[in-house]
Amino acid sequence: MANLTPARLFINGELRDAASGKTYDVISPWTDAPCNKAADAGPEDVDAAIVAARNAFDNTDWSHDSMRQKRFEIVSKYLDLFKANFERLAEIAINEGGCARGSVNREQVAMALQGWQDYLDVFPRVEWTKDYGVRETWGFKNIRKAYNEPIGVVGAITPWNAPLYVNVGKVVAALLAGCTVILKPAPDTPSMGTMFGELANEAGIPAGVMNVICGEDPAMAGEMLVTDPRVDLISFTGSTAVGRRIMEKGAPTLKRVFLELGGKSARIVLEDDPNFARNVAMGMLVNHAGQGCAVQSRLLVHRSRYEEAKAILKATYDAYADSWGEKENPAHTMGPVVNRKQYDRVLGLIEVGKQEATLLAGGNARPDKGPGYLIEPTCFVDVTNDMRIAQEEIFGPVVVVIPFDDDEDAIRIANDSAYGLSGGVCTGDVERGVRIGRRIHTGTFSVNNGMCIAGDLPFGGCKASGVGREWGVEGIEEFLEPKLIAIAG
Ligand code: NAD
């Protein structure tokens, strides 16, 4: 077993076991064997967390205007404590999440903590009040002002693919806004959630403001949060299927929902791109085995240079053969997929791809690289956009390469997707790139590899990729709701 601290619940300021005493094994994606134990919360634990969060919101001054500066200081100290635990966070990301050592300095730990700092930096820009001026109605003067108030108790339901990053995206924004939080991490990666419990008291977070529930059942705790009238808002990142269910199940209590779901984003390489070879090669999907919602998993290449692109990709994949799959190698950013379910699913879709298209590289499980869920970087060519491998989110190290005829065709193909999360274009003509980007229905878009995802920028999707925005000032304001007060004067 890796040297990890067992994941526990954190309820009303207390780090504790499940009321039932039950635990479950956390399986390492590298070994297919237990790497840690976690408390297995039952309904009574979830209820206790809801009671604590509700009470802290309704009966303490956490949400009050007078606490804004104090909240900022507490959340800043919380970040310092996380930074001081960098190596522990790295061990969790590697062992529970299956990230390779080289990803620690990317989104798995370093970028997540940078995003936290970004939230602190944009905090002064939050609009707490809005003046609507004076208006006369029926002979009376009215002085009108909106106060943006914290929404209340937040249920934060998070996935396993970038657990620290997504936990930070929700928890930090909600706390800064003045909400109280129940964090429910994915069963595969409970310890990234538990860290928020372990460090809360030392940061000075009052009892009940921050709560963490982990458990083996993927749905029970989340469904309780979604259906309970004492929870005001659900912030969810995960699959589109569960996102839909959350909207449905949240309807009877008119739950506010933020949903960040899947994607099948397009990377368009135009024929005029002066860095064509580099930008085609960068289309290879390997970081964290392609398990990212905003990855550009459809590579669209102008038909006039399609054969050239195939040759570039073949050489790139061949050269990469020994550059992935070693857990502690700091140069490696690709390890296994997260669990057996994902392993079977990704391999199943690769088999579909072998029927539908031409396999250019990869296409196999790689038990020779280790006993875990290792699948080699895979690339399909001669793909058309109606194929399953072009429409379904694979969430593995698989890219599909699709030819297009002109800008209109590229835009049509990019938009011919249920999803609308992100995308990009590479071109020698930036204005042409922006024109194309403006026509593609996504929440973010990059021109020439511009970094459109950062902690100070709003992130989210349209269509089946979700509702609302996380990160940036907009991400904090998701947790506020305006109250309008008019004074007769
Ligand atoms: P999932 O949507 O099932 O799980 C995400 C979170 O929701 C987890 O914490 C899970 O325990 C919880 N959950 C599951 N069922 C729930 C329910 N009925 N009510 C409330 N909460 C519930 O995702 P998964 O099974 O872990 O992964 C499956 C697919 O989801 C992946 O293949 C991928 O396509 C997608 N995914 C997307 C993202 C993303 O960042 N957008 C992240 C992870 C997974």
Image: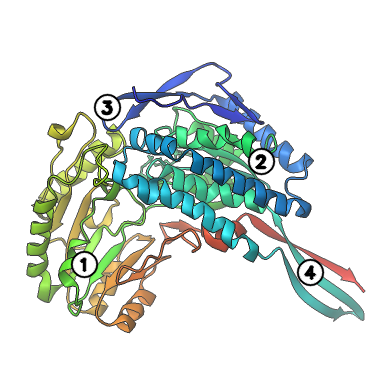
Give the residue type at disc 2. Answer: Pro
* Marks 2 and 3, how far apart at CA: 39 Å
User: What's the residue type where badge 3 is placed?
Assistant: Asp
Q: Is residue 447 left or right of residue 301?
A: right
Nearer-N-terminus badge (1/4): 4
What mark, if any, has residue 229 been given in the picture?
Answer: 2
The secondary structure type at the circle numbered 3 is loop
Image height check: is 396 above or below 200? below
Q: Secondary structure at mark 1?
A: helix
The location of residue 15, given as percent across then percent down, is 59, 26
Q: Earlier in the sequence, mark 4 or mark 2?
A: 4
Residue at x 23% of width, y 48% of height: 397
Three-letter residue code for mark 4: Lys
Residue 126 rendering spot, x and y as whole percentages: 64, 63
Whether disc 4's CB lies below 8 Å from ligand 1 is answered: no
Residue 348 position in % (x across, y down) = 20, 41
Q: Which residue is mark 3?
A: 32
Between marks 4 and 3 in the image, the one whose residue lies nearer the viewer: 3
Q: Earlier in the sequence, mark 2 or mark 1?
A: 2
Q: Which residue is mark 1?
A: 279
Give residue 252's quadrant in the image: top right
Gap in Å between the C-alphas at discs 4 and 2? 29 Å
CA gap between label 1 and label 4 equals 50 Å
Frontmost of labels 2 and 1 is 1
Tag 4 residue: 145
